[in-house]
Image: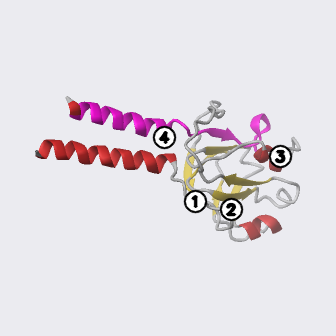
Amino acid sequence: MAARTVVALACMVVMLGLSKAAVYKVGDSAGWTTIANVDYKLWASTKTFHIGDTVLFEYNPKFHNVMRVTHAMYRSCNNSNPISTFTTGNDSVTLTNHGHHFFFCGVPGHCMAGQKLDLNVIHPVSFTPLSDPPISSSSSPSSTTMIPAAGVPGPSPSHAASLSSVAAAVVSLLVSLIFANFAS
């Protein structure tokens, strides 16, 4: 009976960590475009991105794409050697680590016109519960990609553990306790 309780608690801890992830539609209702004069820098500055969050790029693939690039490529709108390119028009990118993530549209002239995005995923610094972030429910993304941040300096690192690493440690401890109880 005690083992079942421990397993149930472990599952609850893991689910708690997973329930904090958010989905953000880039550009909100306008999406990823040059037509609506979206200020993507302003859009990103109003959001707090965390590890595990997903950004959804919705756009017309006949006229746009999404390229993940380095900081230097982002600054100069250089699309010659992107880290990755997305072309479905409904691309979902899961943010897997803290720091800056750089994207722009690789169609000539679009990046220079402002169709570029710098997302800064914050480093977790506390275990304080956060309010539930917005979740997009418009349509299922046709592609989901998990990518790490670009190799540029982000905010000063904190020595606090992330919620997911704490959850993993708790689960590991609980599993060890279960096996110890069965062995004795």
Between disc 2 and disc 4, whose residue precedes? 4
- Closer to the camera: disc 2 or disc 1? 2
Name the residue that disc number 2 marks: 154
Q: Position of residue 166 (x, y in %)?
A: 44, 48
Q: Residue furthest left?
A: 184
Work out which quarter of the rendered image holds the N terminus and state it: top left
Work out which quarter of the rendered image holds the C terminus and state it: top left
Type of secondary structure dominating the magenta stretch: helix
Residue 96 or 155: which is nearer the viewer?
Answer: 155
Q: Position of residue 76 (x, y in %)?
A: 82, 68
Q: Position of residue 4 (x, y in %)?
A: 24, 31
- Closer to the camera: disc 3 or disc 4? 4
Residue 11's label in the rendered image is: none
Q: What span is colored magenta in the figure? A: 3-32
Q: Is residue 35 magenta?
A: no
Q: Amino acid at mark 1?
A: Pro
Q: Is residue 14 magenta?
A: yes
Q: Amino acid at mark 4?
A: Gly
Point 76% across, 70% down: residue: 72
Secondary structure under the numbered disc 4 in the rendered image: helix
Between disc 2 and disc 1, whose residue precedes? 1
Between disc 3 and disc 4, whose residue precedes? 4
Q: Is residue 102 above or below residue 51?
A: below
Between disc 1 and disc 3, whose residue precedes? 3
From the viewer's perspective, tell me whether residue 171 is left or right of residue 130: left
Q: Amino acid at mark 2?
A: Gly
Name the residue that disc number 1 marks: 148
